[in-house]
Amino acid sequence: MSEQYVVGISDRKVAIAPDSIVTYALGSCVGVALYDVKTRIGGLAHIMLPDSKMLPYAEQGRMKFADTGIEDMVDEMISRGADRGGLKAKIAGGADMFKISDGSRLASIGCRNVASVKSALSRLGIQLVAEDVGRDYGRTLYFDLTTGGVKIQSLGKGTKEI
Amino acid sequence: MINSFTDLNDVYIDALKEIGNIGAGNAATSLGVLIDEDVIIGIPKVRIDEFNDVVKSIGGSEEMCVAVLVNFYGEANGVVLFILSIEDAKGITDILAAEEDDGTPGLSEMKLSGIKELGNILGSSYLGSIATLTGMEINLSIPHVAVDMVGAILAVPIIEYGAADSKVMFIEESFSTKEHRFHSHVIMFTDIETLSEIMTRLGIHI
C-alpha cells in the first residue's frame, strides 16, 4: 500500500517509493522536492522564508527557512539511506500573489525565497533539475516517489509535470 | 509587555474582540450603504493559531477565493484582508452594478476592480475606527487583489506576521446579509508591538 503524505507550511516529510508527498497552495512559499533515484528516497519541504539569520531565535523553527530547512531535510534523507551525491532537486512556488510593488518587505518575498533556496542547494552541492517559480499564482505540488516526478497544479491553469 | 502572542490573557483577548467589533461595525455600515442592504456581523473571533490551522479555519488550503489586501503602517503595522468566495464576489458586484448574473464563469476585470474598491472601503473604515479609538496615526497602502487558493493567499500575512513565532494572531469577522446570503471574512493581522501600543492607548496594562 502506498501512502500520500501532506506537508504543511514550514514543514517537511521524507519518504520512500511507492509513497507520494503533496504540499498544497504554495504562494510566495517554495516547495523543495529532493530525490535520490537509486534508493528512491525523496523529501519535500514547504519553505516560508529565505534566511534563518534574519531572526535571532530561529532555532525554534528551522523548517521555516530555506538555509536551515533544506539542510535538515538532507540530513534526514541521508540518515534514512539516501546518497548525498545522488540528490536532485525540483522546486516550485515563490509567486508574488498580490503583485505588490511598493517596495515593502512583502513585495519581494517570493523572489527572495527562490534565490535563497537556489543558493542553499548549490551550497549543499545539489543539482537543480527543474523549476516552476515566480509569476502571481498559487501552486500545489505532488511528488511521486516511484518516478521522482513532480506535478504542479494551479487553479485555472491546469496541471504540468516538471 | 507582551513578548509572544501566546502571552495574551483574557483581558487582552476581550479588548481585541471589541476592537474587531468596532472596526467591523464600521466596515459593515459602509458595505450596507453600498449594497443597500442590512449587513449582519458575526461574533468576532480572536485566534492565536498554528499556521496550518489558520488556513484550515478559512476554508482549506486549495479552496478558491477572492482576496483584497490592504497594508497599514505608521504607529500601527499590519494587514487587513477581505476574503470571499468567487460566487459571492460575483454576487456582490452584481448588486453593486445592479446587474443580473450573466452566467459567465470567473470574474471579469471590471468586477475584480469593483471588489478591490470594496475591499479598500472596508479596510479603510475598519482601520479608521481603530485610529479614532486609539488616537494612533495609521496610513493605508493602495488595495491589492488576488484570485487564488486560500492557502497561497493567507501565506502572505502569515509570512509577514508569523515569521518570529510558530503562531499567528488575527481578528476575524464574518459578514452576511439576509437577502443574499453571502459570507465574507475581514481578517486583521498585526504584530506584537502594535498590539502592545493599542493596549497602552486603551489604558490596559498587565
Image: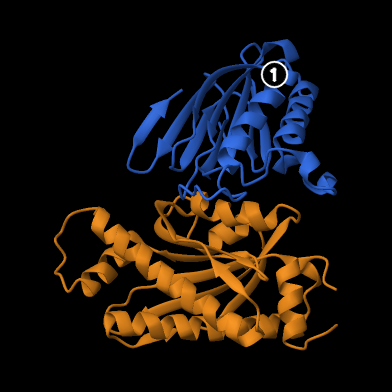
Chain colours: A blue, B orange
Q: Could you tell me residue B126's position as x and y percent?
A: 51, 78
Viewer-proximal residue, A112 or A13? A112
In the rendered structure, the answer to whether residue B160 lies left or right of residue B68 reads: right
Residue A154 visible in image? yes
Pick the residue in front: A117 or B166: A117
What is the quadrant of the N terminus of chain B in the image? bottom right
Q: Residue type at mark 1?
A: Ser
Is B59 or A81 nearer to us in this picture? B59
- Chain letter of disc 1? A
Q: Quadrant of residue A116?
A: top right
Q: 10 Å neighbourhood of mark 1: few (<14), some, or many (≥20)?
A: few
Q: Quadrant of the C terminus of chain B?
A: bottom right
Residue at 41% in and 73% down? B121
Quarter occupied by residue B85 = bottom left
The residue closer to the viewer here, B147 or B177, is B147
What SS does tag 1 mark?
helix
Give the residue pinned by disc 1.
Answer: A122
Residue drawn at x 54%, y 55% as measured from the top left: B154
- Compared to residue B86, the image places residue B126 above or below, namely below
Is residue B107 visible to us here? no
Residue A49, compared with residue A79, is above or below; it is: below
Residue A59: percent from left, percent from top: 84, 44
Q: Is residue B82 above or below residue A64?
A: below
Image location (x, y in percent) of residue A28? 55, 43
- Tell me how many marks there are: 1
In the image, what residue occupies the spot 83% across and 66% down?
Answer: B3
Residue B54 drawn at (x, y percent): 59, 61
